[in-house]
Amino acid sequence: MTDADTNPAPEQPPQIRTICGFWRRVAAFLLDSLLLGIIGFILGLAFYADFARMGASGRWIGFAIALAYFALLNSAAGGGQTLGKRIMRIEVVDRAGRHIPLARSALRYVILGAPFFLNGALIEPAHRVLLAVAAVTVFWIGPSIIYLYVFNRRTRQSLHDLAVGSYVVDSPGGGAPAAGAVWRPHLAVVGCIALCAAALIPLSSLVYHLGMISDLVAVQAKVSGSGEFSGVGIMKGVNMVYKSGTSMTTRTLSVTASVRSRASLSEPVAGRAAAIVLNSYPGAGDEDLISVKLRYGYDIGISSSWISRSFEHSPLGWGRMLPPAP
């Protein structure tokens, strides 16, 4: 009988993967965002006019590109590493240390990317359900992701990681992540953020029905419904101006609208928008100035480019320039 028979080799302890720290993970995300921005910029040079005609729906192009990039490369098919993660030597794995399937990786990015892409999306006021979904996504999922990124030091899982059971660990290596359970108070904070976000929906509806913004929303719908403008935004403001040692207030009604061609960045086109405002908003004539900013360009989420011109006159000045819109 040999010594090997009497003294078997001790079992090797299981390998443990170190959880990635905050700054390396942020650096990887910034590198990936830079790469997607370059892709979007190149696409914008090639398809500028096409993207401009798409208006707000162009953000779905950027979302689809980002989803394909992150879902594929962060999954088992891509070795759990985007380009940024490869540079920072980190990767996405599950609780057992395996790379996650493509479907789970896609869901992971949808949760992460939705707040960003919906935050800049222009949604018509009439689409109440879509507005409510966007509000909850932006004001709950977005802040929750940021909170967990910063404060969940035990597992470094953010909301999208918790949803699919993924971890970001150091690479290369093998074995399960060295992580315990998420500290329960973190989940309580996420729940509180959700309650606050849900409260915004009835609160915003109350503000609307009390008439605080309903008039401006109605005017916005009129300008959008003309067929000449898209992505319309209207707001009221008061500016303080100092002249000869005295202060004066200027009440301004500001209109921002996208147009479909660069040639439409003109004062006559701005005048048509101002005419709609004068005809549909009873208080427009009481303002000191009506400012109309026209812009032409695109926003696909991962890249944007805009050319704009602003025109500013008193309500009487606009009225003299062009006849009121029908």
Image: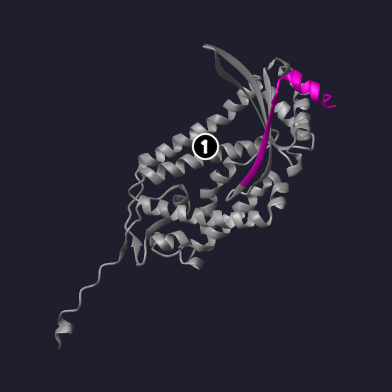
Can residue 165 be seen?
Answer: no
Task: Assign a secondary structure to mark 1.
Answer: helix
Q: Quadrant of the C terminus?
A: top right
Look at the picture and state if 196 lies above or below 121: above
Look at the picture and state if 166 lies above or below 295: below
Residue 318 shown in magenta: yes
Residue 153: percent from left, percent from top:
33, 47
- Label 1: how many residues lie within 10 Å, few (<14), some (14-19) or many (20+)? some
Which residue: 55% across, 30% down?
200
* Amino acid at circle 1: Phe
Can residue 179 be seen?
Answer: yes
Which residue: 61% across, 17% down?
250
- Image quarter for residue 290? top right
Residue 41: percent from left, percent from top:
59, 54
Residue 119 shown in magenta: no
The structure's colour scheme is one colour
Report the span colored magenta.
Answer: 305-326
Q: Which residue is mark 1?
A: 139
